[in-house]
Image: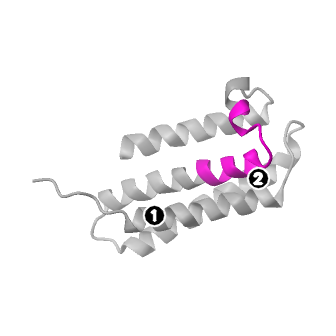
Amino acid sequence: MKYISALFLVFVIAVIILVDSGNLPHSIRAIYDFPNGDKVGHFILFGLLNFFLTRALLSSFPAQPRGWLALSIGLVLALLIFLEEFSQQFFPARTFDLVDFFFSYVGVITFAFLAVIWKTPHRY
């Protein structure tokens, strides 16, 4: 799970850089080319990122309280999401949108819950 979370983090950063620079490939842009598709994208991208990071850290630190660890990861990610959304004001290809911000946070919360309740099968 550590490798998946690291790769997905790199993917999300790459998407942000491509969108900020106005160079997002049409194939990726087409995925969100429906009404409110960008909201779905925020929900899924940041939600999955939180899920993968939370699952990776839960498996790395099994003695830590699950809820506390998920909350810590979620808060750090929430701060980074805020900075990313706020920074959009400085890129001509982007627009600051509180609704995008909201859907990003709902994704983080939803997927954090899923990561905490996810049951990992025992290995024998």
Residue 107 x/y as whole percent: 61, 59
**Secondary structure of the residue carrying numbered label 1:** helix
Q: Is residue 19 left or right of residue 49?
A: right
| Mark 1: few/some/many CA within 10 Å (<14, 14-19, 20+) | some
Front in this rendered view, residue 21 or 122: 122
- Return the residue at label 1: 114
Residue 30 located within the stretch drawn in magenta: yes
Q: What residue is drawn where x is 70% and y is 59%?
A: 103
Q: Which residue is mark 2?
A: 85
The stretch of residues the image draws in magenta is 29-45
Q: How many residues crowd around disc 2 within 10 Å: few (fewer than 14), some, or many (20 or more)?
A: some
Q: Is residue 80 left or right of residue 33?
A: left
Residue 40, relative to residue 99: is it above or below? above
Quadrant housing residue 65: bottom left
- SS for callout 2: helix
- Residue at image coords 65%, 63%: 105
What secondary structure characterizes most of the magenta part? helix
Quarter of the rendering containing residue 23: top right
Name the amino acid, label 1: Leu
